[in-house]
Amino acid sequence: MFGGLGNITGIMKQAREMQSKLKEMQEHIANTRYEADSGAGAVTATVNGKQELLAIKISPETVQSGDVEMLEDLVRSAVCAAQRKATEGAKAKMSELTGGMNLPGLEGLMGGGA
């Protein structure tokens, strides 16, 4: 009759451990930086694991060209590429936690809305 309580206790312990690992992983992902460039290094964007833009570097030669439209495209391209890297990085870390299983809704907990 009381054998079920042991199972429930074990399940609750596993749930707490998983929650703790998830929190650690969220912090790790949030603090990881991802960098991508466009235009052969003309523009470099850095984002964190939450896909928040941290930095943009633009080569002086790119600015001197005076082509504002091209610069806008390069910035957009670099930021999107860095965000894609952040999404892929978060998915890879999540896969470590879940053992490769795709658990619906769990990606949203990573903070990136991937």
Image (spheres, rainbow, N blue to C red):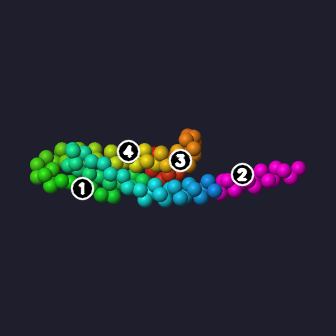
User: For residue 15: magenta?
Assistant: yes
Q: Residue 70 placed where, x, y %?
A: 18, 44
Range of residues picked out in magenta: 1-16
Q: Which mark is residue 43?
A: none
Q: Which mark is residue 96?
A: 3
- Identify the secondary structure beneath mark 1: strand
- Identify the secondary structure beneath mark 2: helix
Q: Residue 76 placed where, x, y %?
A: 27, 46
Q: Which mark is residue 57?
A: 1
Q: CA distance from mark 1 to mark 4?
A: 18 Å
Task: Please name the amino acid that badge 4 sits on.
Answer: Arg
Task: Please name the amino acid that badge 3 sits on.
Answer: Glu
* Residue located beneath label 4 in the image: 84
Query: Does the rendering let one see residue 54?
Result: yes
How busy is the neighbourhood of tag 2: few (under 14 within 10 Å), some, or many (20 plus)? Answer: few
Quarter of image, res 57? bottom left
Q: Which mark is residue 11?
A: 2
Task: Please name the amino acid that badge 1 sits on.
Answer: Lys
